[in-house]
Amino acid sequence: MFEYFQPTLQAPSLDLISVEQLTQDGIKGLIIDLDNTMTPWNDLEVGPKVATWFIKVKAAGIGACVVSNNSKRQRVAVVADRLDIPFVFGATKPRRRAFRSAMNILGTGHQDTAVIGDQLFTDILGGNRLGLYTILVTPINDREFIGTKVMRKMEKVLVWLMKHCAPAKSISTKIH
């Protein structure tokens, strides 16, 4: 059970994920969460470090698609349009449908797609259920949807259990 919650990699932020490492690992498409991964929760501004990282991603020939549980199309569209990338909103992650839609949009498959997000129960679980490369990032800030705050408490319990009940399968701390 714990393997569904173990990311392939862990990074302090989106912009600190090595694009070179993604390329070396054969990644051709990225499915990226919006709130607290790319932007602060419910914010429309993309920070300069994130914008620069997306320029590097495009230069490396890696496609990207925003996949958000946010139900407001316009909210997701504004950020995706600023970065000139496609998006899927109302994703209901960790359900597989939105991840498959994003792979179809990107023209990628299970072997060359990575999921990047800040939550174990949505992004990492959803990506791992499809056998995708998953990267857990630290949330940009503490401001979040109330339901997410509840899930964060459950994540802390899960991480503790993974470290103490299955030490061989604890979360990777490899950072690129």
Image: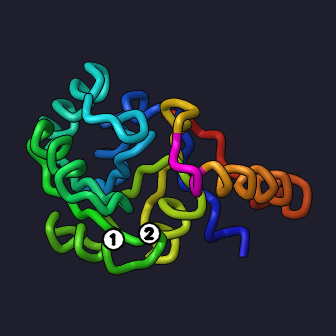
Closest to the observer: 114 or 90?
A: 90
Per the rendering, the mark at residue 4 is: none
Above or below, 156 relative to 82: below
Q: Could you tell whether 59 is left or right of 120 in the image?
A: left
Marks 1 and 2, how far apart at CA: 8 Å
Query: What residue is disc 2 on?
Result: 93
Tag 1 residue: 99
State the image coordinates of residue 6 (x, y, percent, origin top left): 63, 59
Picture quadrant where residue 29 is located:
bottom left
Amino acid type of the residue that numbered disc 2 sits on in the rendered structure? Lys
Q: Range of the magenta residues?
A: 144-148
**Quadrant in which the N terminus is drawn:** bottom right
How many residues crowd around disc 1 within 10 Å: few (fewer than 14), some, or many (20 or more)?
A: many
Q: List x then y, in percent, for residue 70.
A: 35, 58
Of 52 and 78, nearer the camera is: 78
* Residue 65 vertical position relative to residue 110 in the rendered view, above or below: above
